[in-house]
Amino acid sequence: MWLNANNRELQWFLEAAAVYWEKNLPRADDDAAVVVEMFHQDIRVNLRNLAFANAIRRLRPARLVVLTGVEDQWRRTLWNGFDVDTVRQIAQAYGADEVIDVWAAVRREAETPELDDVTVTAYTDATYCRLAKVPRLPADHATRPDYRLRRRYAGGLAARYERVFAGPVVALVTSHVDYDQWGLAVEVARRRSVPIIHTQQTGCLKAYGLFPEHDTRTGTFREELTRLIGDAFENQVWPQRDGLRRSAELVAWRAKVNLGRPSWWRGGVTASVDLGNPAERARMRASVVSRLGFTADRPLVTVFNHAVSDALGTNRELFGSLADWFADTADYAAGNTDAQWLFLDHPSQKLYDSTGFFDSVAKRHRKARHVVFRPSATLSKNALWSLTDLGVTVRGSVSNELPAYGIPVLQAGWSEWSSCGLSTVVDDTDAYWKTLESSIAAIRDGADLVTEEQVRRARLWLWLYRSGTDVVTPLVPQWEVWPADTLLKTMRAAYRHIEADADPLFTAVQRMWTRQEPMLTRTDWLA
C-alpha cells in the first residue's frame, strides 16, 4: 500500500473506522457478498471502493469479500509500494469478512477458466503491453516466455474469479475495468449478471454503474457505459440546461485555471487558460505560430497522442491500436499540405512507453515542414488553445475540454462522454479520413465547426463531471487531501465526530442503486 503514514496515525484511523462501521452496518443473514477489489497501491483508490461497498451493504446486508494481491511484473512496473498486510488491516477495519490474496492463489496453480479464450487473450494482450510499456505486441510475442506466463496468469485469474462469483454476489465494486486483474473480474461478473460499480480517482466520490438489466452485452463495459451516460445526459441533464447555465458557466471558468484532475491531460502552472476574447487569441496565435515555424494563413490541426499502452481495446476504437492511429494520422498529415499539423506527446508517456514511439514517428516525418512534433510540456495551454483550429484524439479528455471553449474536436474512438454531443465522433476509418479532409476545407473557408449547442453541451458536461456527479461526503475526503497523515487524520475526525444520519454517501448510493442509474449523483435530478 502506497501510504507512508505515521504508524500511530494509521492505527488510530483503523480503530476509528472499525468502530464506525461496526455500529453502522447491519449484520448479514445469508451468504450473499459484496465483492470489492483492492489491487491499487494508492490508499485513496481503495478507500473509495470500500466506502461504496459498505454503502451498498447498508441497503442489502451482505458479507464483504476483498480481492487483493500483487504480481511481480505489476510490482516492478507500477506497484513498488504495495503491501498486502496493510491492505488486509484496512479491509478488516471496514468490516471485511474475507480477504483473498488472488495473486498468491494464481501463482500456486494453473487453472483453466470457463471464460472464452478470445476474451482471456484480449486482456492478456492489453496487460502485456501495459506492463512492458510497449505500444503494440511484439511480432514473436506468442513464443516469448513472459507473454506465455502472462497468458497463464490471465487464465488463472479468470478461473479464480469464477469461483468467487459462483455463489450469490450482490455487486462488484472496482476502481478499474481494464487489464487482467480488474478486467477479467468485470467480465466474469457480467456473465453472472452481477451489478458492477466503477469508482473514479478524482473529486470526492464519483462512480459509474452497469446493472445487468441495462447491459446489452454487445460491447465492452466502457462501450455500454458510453451509451448509458449519453442517454442520461440527453434525458436528465440537457433538459435542465437553462436552470444550470450559471453553474455550468462558473465551472467552465474554474476549469480554465484548475486543469488538474479530472482534466488531467495537463495540470500545474502551465494549465491556466486566460484568453478572454478573439482579439487576445489572435495576438497569442501570431506569436506561437511564428515560434513553431508555422504560418498564420492555414488551418492548424493539433493531434493529441495518448499514453500508447493504456487500456488497449477497452472502448470502441477505429484503429488496431492507439499507436496505429497516431502513426497513420502522421502519415496522412505529411501528405496533406492544406493544413499545418502539431503532434503532441502525452505528458505521462514515460510511464507508458519504453520504446521511444513518439520520437520514432517524429523522425520519420522530420522533412515535412508543415508537420511539427513537440512534447506537450513545451507549450502552455494559452499557447495551445490559441493556435488550435481543430483538435484530434481517440478518447482523450481534450474532446470535452476544447469544445467548451469553442474549439472543434474529431474523435477516432469513444470516451465516456462521446454520446453527449460535444465532439464529432465517426464510426469507421473511411469516415475519419473524410471528416479530417472536410473539416480542414471548412476551416479554410472560414466556417465555424463548433455550434453554440456543442459549446453549451461541453460546458454542461464539465459541470456534470466536476459537480453533478461528485458526491461530497466526509467519509471520502477530496482527492487532493494528502499526504497520507493528513488524509488519515481527516477521516479519523469524520468517523469519530460526524453521525451517519443522512450522510450524502448513503443517500446518493441508495438513489443510484434503487434506480439502477449509470452515475452516482450529488442531487436527485428527478425531484
Image: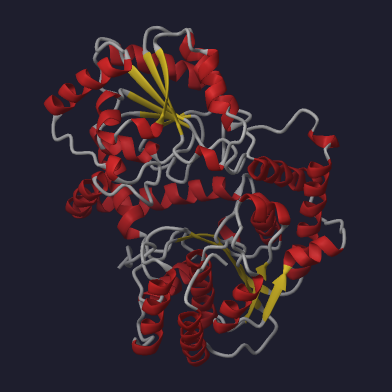
**Residue 473 as seen in the image, left or right of residue 170:** left
Locate the C terminus and report the quarter of the image it occupies: bottom left
Which residue appears at 54% of the width and 81% of the height? 94
Which residue appears at 30% of the width and 22% of the height? 389
Relative to 250, is 288 above or below? above
Residue 132 x/y as whole percent: 67, 41
Query: Who is closer to the viewer here, 238 or 68?
Result: 68
**Quick check: can you spot residue 243?**
yes
Q: How is the image coloured?
A: secondary structure
**Quick check: can you spot residue 318?**
no
Which residue appears at 47% of the width and 66% of the height? 44
Q: How many marks?
A: 0
Relative to 383, is 459 above or below? below
- Residue 512 appears in which quarter of the rendering? bottom left
**Residue 513 as seen in the image, left or right of residue 180:** left
- Residue 88 appears in which quarter of the rendering? bottom right
Which residue appears at 55% of the width and 45% of the height? 223
Locate the N terminus and report the quarter of the image it occupies: bottom right
Residue 90 x/y as whole percent: 56, 78
Query: Who is closer to the viewer here, 15 or 277?
Result: 15
Residue 496 x/y as whole percent: 39, 89
- Residue 304 appears in which quarter of the rendering? top left
**Residue 286 as seen in the image, left or right of residue 146:** left
Query: Who is closer to the viewer here, 106 or 57?
Result: 106
Relative to 7, is 256 above or below? above
